[in-house]
Amino acid sequence: MKPCCLLDLPHLDYAEALDLMLGLVEAKRTGRLTPEVLMLIEHEPVITLGRRAGAGDILAADHLLDRLGVSVHRVQRGGLATYHGPGQNVAYPVFNLAAFKMGVADMVGLLEEVVIAVLADFSIQAGRREGQRGVWIGPAKIASVGLAVQGGIVFHGVALNRDPDLTHFDLINPCGLTGVRMTAMTKELGGPVDPDQVRARLRAHFSRLFDLQLIPWTLSQAQEKAQNHGRTATQALVA
């Protein structure tokens, strides 16, 4: 099994998480951080724009975003616009592709498989949709995947809708799929879902499918590695 530092937090500010993730990527890229890293987090309401996203992928006016407290972040991952917010379980793997002997497409597929397995644990049957990334329940999308690669290190990751405010997805054109309907675990089950149980199943299936030995990590431990060897999010995005 591959050692993997696990940062499992109920919440972390998106900008702080992005800075942290980029610092950890740099630490791994330079060989100063050997283990793989998995971050399991929830965020405040944010819209993220991938490399191919344009202004037209945000459907709401600035004043509405301000009123709802939704910030916008341009990021390095592939894809278009996505939404993150409370009630959404986000998993950020900071993995060395060579250690897993796989390419980016294989990594995306395995991330999708983690989510499909988690949903099966809650008796939700989900799967893939030909030609479209993410995890789907019929015509509705329940999880989005977007990755970036820098120096052989893959980062960003997958977002599973447990119980987010689904109306916030109306603020964007999700992943460039006009008219796509988003769904969530609570909507599919018709009742509440324990967030701790979802995180537990994410940990279990990441460990199983990626063959990881998860080693609990504190935020201060992660920040120390990122601060010693990383760059700020702004520096990384303009590099």
Image (cartoon, grey):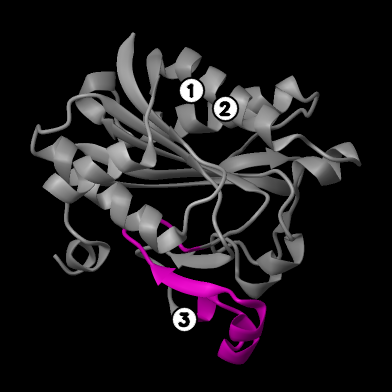
Image position of 68 (left or right of 112): right
Instruction: Label 1: state its secondary structure.
Output: helix
Residue drawn at 19 percent across, 50 percent down: 227
Residue 191 pos. (x, y %): 89, 40
Q: Residues within 10 Å of mark 1 (few under 14, many from 20)?
A: many
- Number of residues whose C-alpha sits closer than 10 Å to that of mark 3, classed few (under 14), some (14–19) or many (20 or more): few
Residue type indicated by callout 3: Ala
Q: Nearer the viewer, mark 3 or mark 2?
A: 2
Q: Which residue is under mark 2?
A: 202
Q: Amino acid at mark 2?
A: Leu
- Residue 140 vs residue 87, the one in the foreground: 87
Provide the residue span drawn in magenta: 55-81
Q: Residue beneath label 3, please?
A: 55
When the figure is inspected, residue 172 is found, relative to residue 82, above or below; the finding is below
> What residue is rendered at 29% in x and 24% in y?
102
Type of the residue with mark 1:
Phe
Q: Are marks 2 and 1 in contact (CB under 8 Å)?
A: yes
- The residue lying furthest to the front in this view is 220
Res 115 → quadrant:
top right
Report how far apart the C-alphas of labels 3 and 1 lie in the structure: 34 Å
Quadrant holding the N terminus: top left
Question: Going from the N terminus, do you reach mark 3 or mark 2 first?
Answer: 3
Identify the mark nearer the N-term, 3 or 1. Answer: 3
SS for callout 3? helix
Q: How many marks?
A: 3
Q: What residue is shown with label 1? A: 206
Percent position of residue 206, x then y:
48, 22
Q: Where is residue 2 shown, x and y percent of the image?
A: 30, 14
Query: Mark 2 packing: few (<14 Cα in 10 Å), some, or many (20+)?
Result: many
Name which residue lies at 53% across and 66% down.
Answer: 46
| Residue 41 horizontal side relative to residue 177, left or right | left
Q: Establish if 128 lies above or below 212.
A: below
